[in-house]
Image (cartoon, grey):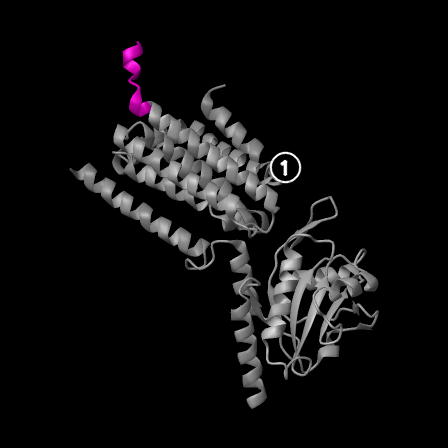
């Protein structure tokens, strides 16, 4: 009987250990994939958009300070991508349509950043942008020509890009929202268009009231 | 060479950084070869601990249930997509993998398995059949990349690996249920 009791005690201890292990391993049952953990971490950290040089579809070069005092809605892509990127950009354009038009270009700018600077030169980006009704002004598409600058941005914003050896990349996708001071304040699910549009509209509405 | 030394040797071989890196570079090898072999090394090394701490095992794992629970928890933990990613990114998690799988899964598995009654053994296999089929379904159908360090195609490969193992478990259970080995002796 003593042995049975010991078994029960040991079983309970093991289960408690299991609960603690899973609790720590998933940040309190919140994040079962590294991607969720990454997003939660980013929203906590609010990293600053690094000082990198962007080159857009019109060949203009500038840094993020070009968009000073505006929110920037960002996605990362490469134009040769046939799978998730068109979907991502299509959804981005839907968010653009859902936002009150008075804010577009005034309080918020849309920016698609390519992580394939060798192939995505301004001409390619220019062609690509037309497919999504991007005007190149309030919604710009740009590359970061300097690879080390590009890497620093990807690292800061937690964008993981793995080349697959056939000229394609595997990468995580999301909507990134940077505030007027160049800080990343939110990372949103790119498949939840309405939710993202609502969130951004609220942020912009609060801003203009103040 | 007895199995304890063989287990230890295999364990050390798996830790060697180039070997570990190579195995971790492919998702399905990481989860369905490296991790199970780590459990096996613990399984092989178990007699060393069983003779050294025989009273401990006798006292606290008399019916085998605490040990098998520990085994299920540890293996379940390493089936989470996140833990695999973090093993590649954080050395602490990697270290925990190399310690937990042999010593907290392999050793208790060996100590518990013989002590479990047939119903207990079947329950464990049923739990893993369900878990593997669910994980397989999840990895095959997830359109999202669950692990940041692996390509989507590797994720689908892993899903089929899970599903195949799940099916093998089910066949084994069916065999156990429908055939009586002693009838053929």
Q: Position of residue A1 (x, y in %)?
A: 15, 37
- The magenta stretch spans residue B183: yes
Residue B43 or residue A73, whichever sits in front = A73
Q: SS class of the residue under badge 1?
A: helix
- Asked whether residue B31 is in view, the answer is no
Q: Is residue A38 left or right of residue A164?
A: left
**Residue at numbered disc 1:** B22
Q: Position of residue A166 (x, y in %)?
A: 73, 44
Residue A202 or residue B10, whichever sits in front = A202
Q: Is residue B94 left or right of residue A136?
A: left
- Asked whether residue A202 is in view, the answer is yes
- Name the residue located 17 percent from the left edge and 39 percent from the top edge: A2
Q: Position of residue A28 (x, y in %)?
A: 42, 59
Dot 1 falls on which chain? B
Q: Residue furthest bottom?
A: A210
How many residues crowd around disc 1 within 10 Å: few (fewer than 14), some, or many (20 or more)? few
Position above or below: B83 against A77: above
Specify the quadrant that holds the C terminus of chain A.
Answer: bottom right
- The magenta stretch spans residue B111: no
Residue B66 or residue A135, whichever sits in front = A135
Main structural element of the magenta stretch: helix, strand or loop? helix
* Count of marks overlaid on the render: 1
Q: Residue furthest left?
A: A1
- Name the residue located 46 percent from the left edge and 32 percent from the top edge: B165
- Name the residue located 32 percent from the left edge and 48 percent from the top edge: A15
Q: Quadrant of residue B125?
A: top left
Residues drawn in magenta: B176-185
Q: Position of residue A117 (x, y in %)?
A: 78, 59
Q: Residue furthest top?
A: B185
- Name the residue located 75 percent from the left edge and 78 percent from the top edge: A66
Q: Quadrant of residue B17?
A: top right
């Amino acid at each position: 009987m003593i042995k049975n009791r010991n078994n029960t005690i040991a079983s309970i201890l093991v289960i408690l250990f299991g609960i603690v292990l899973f609790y720590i391993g998933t940040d309190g049952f919140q994040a079962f994939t590294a991607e969720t953990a990454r997003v939660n971490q980013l929203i906590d950290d609010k990293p600053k958009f690094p000082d990198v040089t962007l080159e857009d579809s019109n060949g203009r070069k500038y840094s993020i300070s070009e968009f000073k005092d505006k929110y920037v809605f960002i996605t990362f892509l490469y134009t040769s991508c046939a799978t998730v990127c068109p979907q991502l950009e299509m959804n981005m354009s839907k968010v653009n349509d859902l936002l009150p038009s008075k804010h577009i270009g005034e309080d918020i700018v849309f920016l698609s950043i390519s992580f394939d600077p060798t192939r995505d030169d301004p001409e390619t980006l220019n062609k690509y942008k037309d497919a999504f009704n991007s005007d190149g002004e309030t919604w710009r598409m740009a590359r970061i020509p300097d690879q080390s600058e590009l890497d620093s941005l990807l690292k800061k914003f937690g964008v993981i890009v793995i080349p697959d050896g056939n000229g394609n990349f595997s990468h995580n996708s999301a909507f990134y929202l940077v505030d007027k001071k160049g800080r990343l304040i939110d990372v949103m699910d790119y498949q939840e268009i309405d939710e993202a549009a609502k969130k951004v509209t609220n942020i912009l509405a609060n801003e203009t009231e103040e | 060479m007895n199995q304890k030394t063989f287990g230890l040797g295999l364990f050390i071989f798996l830790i060697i950084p180039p070997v570990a890196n190579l195995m971790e570079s492919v998702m399905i090898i990481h989860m369905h070869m490296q991790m199970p072999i780590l459990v096996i090394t613990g399984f092989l090394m178990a007699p060393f601990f069983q003779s050294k701490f025989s009273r401990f095992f006798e006292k606290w794992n008399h019916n085998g249930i605490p040990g098998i629970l520990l085994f299920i928890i540890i293996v379940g933990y390493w089936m989470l997509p996140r833990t695999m990613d973090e093993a590649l990114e954080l050395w602490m998690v990697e270290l925990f993998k190399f310690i937990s799988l042999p010593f907290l899964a392999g050793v208790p598995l060996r100590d518990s398995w013989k002590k479990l009654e047939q119903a207990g053994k079947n329950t464990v296999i049923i739990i893993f059949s369900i878990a593997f089929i669910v994980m397989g379904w999840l990895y095959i159908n997830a359109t999202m990349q669950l692990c940041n360090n692996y390509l989507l195609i590797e994720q689908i490969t892993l899903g089929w690996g899970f599903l195949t193992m799940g099916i093998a478990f089910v066949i084994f259970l069916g065999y156990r249920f429908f055939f009586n080995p002693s009838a053929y002796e």
